[in-house]
Amino acid sequence: MSDITSVCEILANRYSVRAFESTPVDSELLEQIFTKAQQAPSNCNVQPWQVCVVSGNTLATLRDKFMTTLMSGAKPNPEFNWMPQYQGIHRERQFGSANALYSALGIAREDKKARQMAMANNWQFFGAPHAAFFTMDKYLDIMGAVDLGIYAQTLSLILAEHGIQNCMQGALGQFPDPVKELLGIPEERGILFGMSFGYAKADAKANQARTDRASTDDAVQFFT
């Protein structure tokens, strides 16, 4: 278990891990963690999340299927609305996040091939031994998406309490077909996003990237 125990400490030390050790997390510990995550709140207690945790041979098969999909030139076909383009300060922050990662990796802005390869690592789960796909009934739309976000954050905090790191990935919802086919996910359920998780490679270049946060004054208004 991690030496970091408080939520504030976990948040202060958390970053998106993009290089993992191959060592898997103990299966009993994983079951305990996902059981605890069931305490996450949801609107009207509907608990809409249906989570697919993928490891071992199944994860290896998905890596191959994703690579085949990417090499075919297939376009993303997400099941939920990922189309809005960031604008203004949100776009600036998006660029800042990308710059932090590519700078840590030593990839120049004009090196498009290297950037594409770095992006492709999303669908290789950054070498993680585990991945989770967060799915829900499609009709739930934005209300279900809110609940899945709350659940995923709860899960992330519990994982971190046990020294297990993760990377939340919208990319894992971009090509749902190979995942749904392999895992037998019914048509009425959609993959919203995913998460790679395991133990971080502390010395990996990708894990040196850090992003900043907006000030509280920019993000919060207090009314009395």
Image (tube, rainbow, N blue to C red):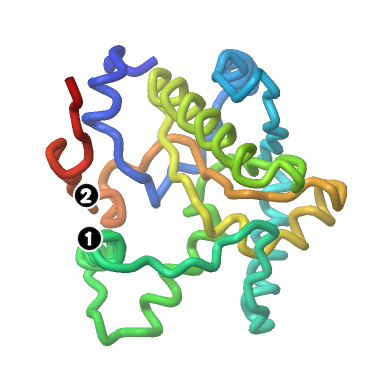
Mark 1 Cα-neighbour bin, 10 Å: few <14, some 14–19, many ≥20: some
Q: Residue at x 86, y 52 (%)?
A: 187
Total marks placed: 2
Relative image position of residue 100 (x, y in whole percent): 22, 60
Snapshot quadrant of residue 79:
bottom right
Separation of marks 1 and 2 at Cα, in angstroms? 6 Å
Q: Which mark is residue 203?
A: none
Residue holding disc 1: 100
Q: Is residue 104 left or right of residue 47?
A: left
Looking at the image, residue 108 sits to the left or right of residue 132; the answer is left
Judged from the image, the secondary structure of the residue bearing numbered disc 2 is loop
> Which is more toward the observer, 123 or 180?
180
Q: Is residue 211 left or right of residue 201?
A: left
The vertical placement of 101 against 168, above or below, is below
Residue plotted at (50% across, 59% down): 122
Residue 123, compared with residue 21, is above or below; it is: below
Q: Earlier in the sequence, mark 1 or mark 2?
A: 1
Say which element carries label 1. helix
x, y percentage for residue 7?
31, 18
Task: Give the percent coordinates (x, y) of residue 216.
Answer: 15, 36
**Mark 2 Cα shell of 10 Å, populated few (<14), some (14-19), many (≥20):** some
Instruction: Name above or below for residue 62 compared with residue 20.
Output: below
Residue drawn at x 57%, y 14% is 39
- Residue that extends furthest to the front in the rendered view of this protein: 224
Q: Residue 180 vs residue 197: left or right?
A: right
Image vertical order of residue 37 relative to residue 139, above or below: above
According to the image, label 2 marks what residue?
210
Q: Residue at x 82, y 53 (%)?
A: 182
- Label 1 is placed on what type of residue? Ala
Q: Are marks 1 and 2 in contact (CB under 8 Å)?
A: yes
